[in-house]
Image: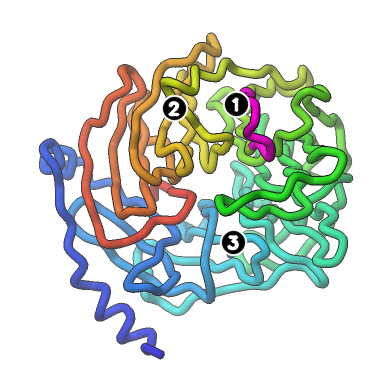
Amino acid sequence: MATRREFLAGAAGICLTASIGGVRAAQDAPRLMSAARIANRDGGALWRPDALTPFELPARGHALAHLPDGRVLLMGRRPGLFASMIDPRDPAAPLQSFAPAKACRFAGHAAVSPDGTSLVTSEFDAASVEAVLVARDPGSGAERARWRPGGIEPHEPIFARSGARLVAALGGLIEDGGVTGPIFNPGGVRSAVVELDPLSGKVLARHALGASFASLSLRHLAVAPDGETIAVAAQDQDVTVTRPLMSLLRLGKGLELLPQPDPRDFDFRGYIGSIAVDRSGEFVAAASPRGGLVGFWSMTSGRWCGGLAIADVCGVTAASEGGMFWASSGLGGIAKIAAAGPRVEAQWHTQAGFDNHLLLV
C-alpha cells in the first residue's frame, strides 16, 4: 500500500485541460473541494483552474460543509465511520477526524449554523436505521446533544431563518442500493422534511407528500438567501412512472412540487444527487448522474428553466456571481454554468473522479 507521501507525490502531477473560455475564467481563481477518487484511491481534491491538489481520507467521502475557522468538514459516505476536517490552505496537513455517536453511523451530511456556533451531523442507529441528529462542537466535533426526530435515515440537514430553524430531510430508506438497483421499502419510503428548534431538537413541523408520492425519498436541501425558502430534491424508488423530483418548502407552509420536464427531453431517471441555490436566490440547480443532466428551476416562479447534458454529473454548488453555478462529474469534468439559457461558460478536465458533492472554498 502506498504511503501518504507517495500518494500525494504521485497525484501531484495530474494535468488539467481547459476548454475554450477556460483561460479567461481562470482569472477568477475559484477553489472547489470535493471527495474524489484519484489513481484508484478514495480521497479528496482541492481544485483551481491551474492545479489539482489531492488529499487523503480514511475512506470514501461524501458531502462537505464550511467550518467557522476556515476549515472544511468532509463527511464519510453513508454508512460513514468518519468525519474529517481539512484546511484548504494546507490540504496535506494531518487530518482531524471524529467518529459517529455511539452505535450510530454517519448519513453523509452535516450543517453549520450561520454564526458558526453549532454543527449538526445526520446519523442513524446502526441496528434500527432510526434517524439521529447530533449537535456537536464545530471546532472539535465533540458531541453536545443527540436528537431523534422520528423517522428513518436522515439525509441532509440545513440551517434556515438565520440559524433559528434546523431543517432535516428524512430519506426514509431502510436500504439504498444506489444506481445498481434501489430497494423499494415495504409500505413505501415514508420520507419527510422536518423543522426543528436548533437549541432543543424539538420537532416544530413535519412535511410529507401525498400517498401518490410514497416512493419518493426526500434527501437533499438547499436554502435560499432569504432564509425562508428551501429547495428539496428527491430520489424515486419506483421509476415505472415519472414523478416530480423537486419541491420548495416555505417554512411553516409545506411542500410545493415543481414541474418535472418531459423525460423525452430531460430525463433525470428518478434521481437527483445534489442541488444548490445561486447567490441571487433566483435559480436552483439539480444534478443527476444517472440522467447525465443538470436542470434549473426558478426559485421565485417555480418554472422549469431548462437543462444541460453533462455525463455523470453530480456535484453542484453556487458560484460567487448570481445566476452562476459550478458542477463536477465522476469523469473528471469541472464546468462553470450560467442558469440563464442555460449554457456552459467554461469547462476543464482532470484525472480525478469527483464524488457527489462540491463546495466553493
Task: Check disc 2 and give the amino acid type.
Answer: Gly
Task: Check disc 1 and give the amino acid type.
Answer: Met
Residue behind mark 2: 295
In the image, residue 37 lies at what x, y percent?
A: 40, 66
- Which residue lies at the image location 33% right of the left edge and 86% below the top edge? 5
Graded by Cα atoms within 10 Å as few (under 14), some (14 to 19) or many (20 or more), the crowding at tag 3 reads: many
Instruction: Give the left or right position of residue 19, taking residue 101 as reference.
Output: left
Distance from disc 3 to disc 1, alpha carbons, whole Å, reads: 23 Å
The image quadrant of residue 1 is bottom left
Earlier residue among tags 2 and 3: 3
Earlier residue among tags 2 and 1: 1
Confirm or deny contact between disc 2 and disc 1 (CB under 8 A): yes
Q: Secondary structure at mark 3?
A: loop
Residue behind mark 3: 77
**Magenta stretch: residue 147 in it?**
no
In the image, residue 9 lies at what x, y percent?
A: 25, 80
